[in-house]
Amino acid sequence: MFNFYEFVYGINWLISQDCKKNNNSIVLLKESVLSCVKCRLAENRTNVVFGEGSLHAKLMFIGEGPGAEEDIQGRPFVGRAGKLLDKMILAMGLTRDAVYIANIVKCRPPDNRAPFRDEAELCKPYLIEQINMIKPELIICLGSIATNYLLNVNVSITKVRGSQQEFQGIPVIPTYHPAYLLRNPGKKGEAWDDLKKAMAFLHLL
Ligand code: SF4
């Protein structure tokens, strides 16, 4: 609906106000997450890995949780698997700055174990807030843990990869986790098929 502010200041001003509001909201959210001790993963973390990327991203990647390098740097997907994710993003015709990358849990599980469901449930509200602020057009879930915890299902990634799922009205395409692809390079072709589906959805093909 055409309103007073749009009439006086124009649509670009309105958009810039929305951007500032979004930016402020995510800064406030990040501040609260950085001091979170809601679950046992707070005990051994070096840094909280909040997530990063464009607040206007059309595409959001969601992994299961930080690893050792991510815990040290406080940034998502910066280890070997992260380097492969960077290549996957580039192959899609995008850059890391243009997407948003986050995890189900924001603190590193010890010994690189998968996050437990209770940890995921306690941390997931932060991720949902991020999703609500960024409003991506598409989410790619990396691996079965991220897929199962986000969608609240219990399926094998081999069964669900490449299919179109949905989270709160946002389409979700699960694919293999880059760490799995490093261990199983023969699966990269299937992952590329999944990424091509995402590219088609985003009109990148
Ligand atoms: S994993 Fe999430 S819920 Fe648990 S302490 Fe870290 S930020 Fe809080």
Image (tube, grey):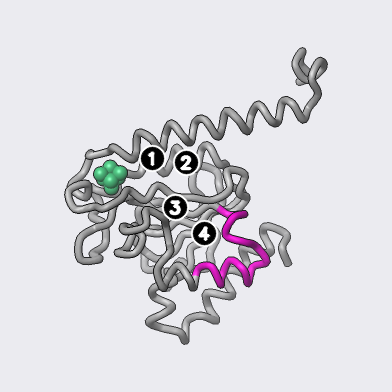
Q: Magenta residues?
A: 85-99
Which residue is the site of mark 1? 126
| First reached walking from the N terminus: tag 4 or tag 2 | 2
In this rendering, would 34 be left or right of 158?
left
Going from the N terminus, do you reach mark 3 or mark 1 first? 3
Of the 4 image quadrants, the one containing the C terminus is: bottom right
Give how far across and how far down residue 54 sits, in percent.
58, 48
In the displayed structure, 24 sits above or below 90; it is above
Residue type at numbered disc 4: Ile
**Residue identifier under label 4:** 140
The stretch drawn in magenta includes residue 89: yes
Q: CA distance from mark 3 to mark 2?
A: 9 Å
Q: Earlier in the sequence, mark 3 or mark 2?
A: 3
Dominant secondary structure (helix, strand or loop) of the stretch shown in magenta: helix
Residue designated by label 2: 130
* Alpha carbons under labels 4 and 3: distance apart: 11 Å
The count of marks equals 4
Element under disc 4: strand
Q: Are marks 3 and 2 in contact (CB under 8 Å)?
A: yes
Q: Is residue 22 above or below residue 140?
A: above
Residue 14 is situated, as x and y percent measured from the top left of the image, at 72, 25
Decide if ligand 1 comes within 8 Å of the CB at mark 1.
yes
CB-based contact (under 8 Å), mark 4 and mark 3: no
